[in-house]
Amino acid sequence: MAGPEQVRKWTGKRGVGRVRSPYRHSRSRDGAIPLASAPVVYRFAWLGRVSTKDMQDPTLSLPRQLGVSQRALPENAVIVANFYDVESGRMDLDARGGGHAHEQFDIPIPRDGGISDLLAEAERTDRHFDYVICESIDRTARHMYYGTSIEHRLERAGVRLLAADEPFELSTVDGRKPKIATQLLTRRVKQSISEYYVVDMLEKAWDGYAVHAEAGFNIGKPCHGYRAKHVPHPVPAKRAKGIKKTFLEPDPAETPAVRKIFEWRVNERLSRRAIADRLNRDLERYPPPIPVDPGRAVGHWTDSNVRDIETNPKYTGYMVWNRRGRKNRGNRINPIEEWIWSAEPVHEPLVDLEIWLRAQEVGQHRFGSRSTSNTNVRHPQTKRSYLLRTYLFCDSCGRRMNGKTRRGHAYYVCAPKKGYVPEGHPAPGSFWVREDALVAKLDEFLSAHVFGAYRRSLLTYNLQELGVKAQREREDHIAALRHRIDDIAVKMKRVMRSLELFDNPDQDLIRDINDRRAELRERKAALETQLTEAEEQHE
């Protein structure tokens, strides 16, 4: 008696409804090959990922993931392509798969691309695989939205995404499709837990860094002007490994430059470019900052060096953290209300907090202004200079007044744009003040209050203040020279100790070491001469 089994056998040869070519495989609507014409071997692509290259070892983790995935496959399945990345699973999907961190390791797995290459090939009609397997679903992405997006793209292309730690079926039984309900529930629960775990870990780590900063410990490389003051780690296990925590203490060789930057910025309102030019005139006294990567050092002061020092609140003695959003804001500066400050100063300040605040306001006052009094020959509207340029501001709106000349007289003008005139402004559009009237009032003030009857006592007081300031600068300069001489002496010892690393040093190595010693000796002699001159002036 004929039954369903006989019909299935007949269908596998002839089909129903129309005649099919015996040499052509047919696909279902979802792109999968039906059981009747399925190949004997299931073709798989393997997907792997390691989060970071610093905290994990891709040469061990990725082979382990591949081995787990292989053991979960049936005997008639084979992995034909390997796709893996060394990157965070929380990155945007559009940015995934384009990194080169994997090139830094000797990973014993041939690589056919990353996650982006996997998705691109899955959507091709001539792809080399019909299934994708990974060790665990969180290897696709740590963010549930991105994980389900990857799964949806593969599903639309007719490719199933499987995980080695989930139950799954490949073949059909009695014509029924493989059951995925339990697999789907397990996957969604794991994705939710994975995302919760990452977010919870990040929040706890953030709180830990905040408490670390509030306690006064420094995070990262000490800023220019300070050096690391290491203290034993409070945890015995970490202390036994030699791990230490770091406070900040002033570096005698670098503090003079920091103090000069704030002095010139606040008192003279110099631009950052002008400050950098002044510092570059005496690099021996004001050594430039060295970045985290010494290979990127340019050997002189730049505008960005001055800006980094001017805007860093650590110079006030407070420990401050979270000034920049390095992971979620593209390293841009966070709003000040999000900065984490220590409750009180935790290291020796190089500038007062009031001075630091005044330095932050100079940029607004100087906007669009030059440091020199000469004219800007490149600007078509600049034909003359004005005595009080950059020093006059409108009391109503706070804008800096610019100079203009009308009928042979110099004026200072406040002319806010239409729609930006605040209430109470002296004029609806603009108002003008003559320069000669301002200069006359300024002369009266100087004659009465600066060059008046008590000018001798005022001059004596100012000279005393300048003497104390000059004395402190000389002491700082002497301390910086001594520190640099001691540092060169340590380097010379290190150069000689490097010979102990080689049993049979060649002539080239010996020549390089001698050249380096001669260079250090010459630099040390020059610094000792400067120290002798500075000590004689100090006496």
Image: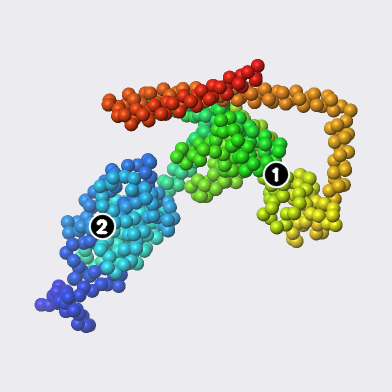
> Considering only vertical position in the picture, is 32 above or below 300?
below
Residue 251: image location, x then y, percent: 55, 27
Q: Residue at x 69, y 51 (%)?
A: 376
Residues under labels 1 and 2: Cα distance?
65 Å
Tell me the kind of residue under disc 2. Ala
Which label sits on residue 81?
A: 2
Label 2 residue SS: strand
Residue 476 at what x, y percent from top left? 61, 24
The type of residue carrying mark 1 is: Thr
Residue at 69 percent of width and 44 percent of height: 371
Q: How many marks?
A: 2
Q: Quadrant of residue 336?
A: top right
- Residue at 67%, 34% in the rendered image: 263
Mark closest to the chain's N terminus, 1 or 2: 2
Q: Which residue is mark 1?
A: 372
Q: Position of residue 378 (x, y in %)?
A: 67, 54
Looking at the image, residue 493 lies above or below residue 50: above
Q: Residue 145 lies in what quarter of the image? A: bottom left
Q: Residues within 10 Å of mark 1 (few under 14, many from 20)?
A: few
In screen coordinates, is 1 left or right of 181?
A: left
Q: Visible in this render: residue 394?
A: yes
Q: Are marks 1 and 2 in contact (CB under 8 Å)?
A: no
Q: In this image, 71 relative to 436: left or right? A: left
Viewer-nearest residue: 104 or 340: 104
Residue 472 falls left or right of residue 7: right
Q: Nearer the viewer, residue 348 or 447?
A: 447
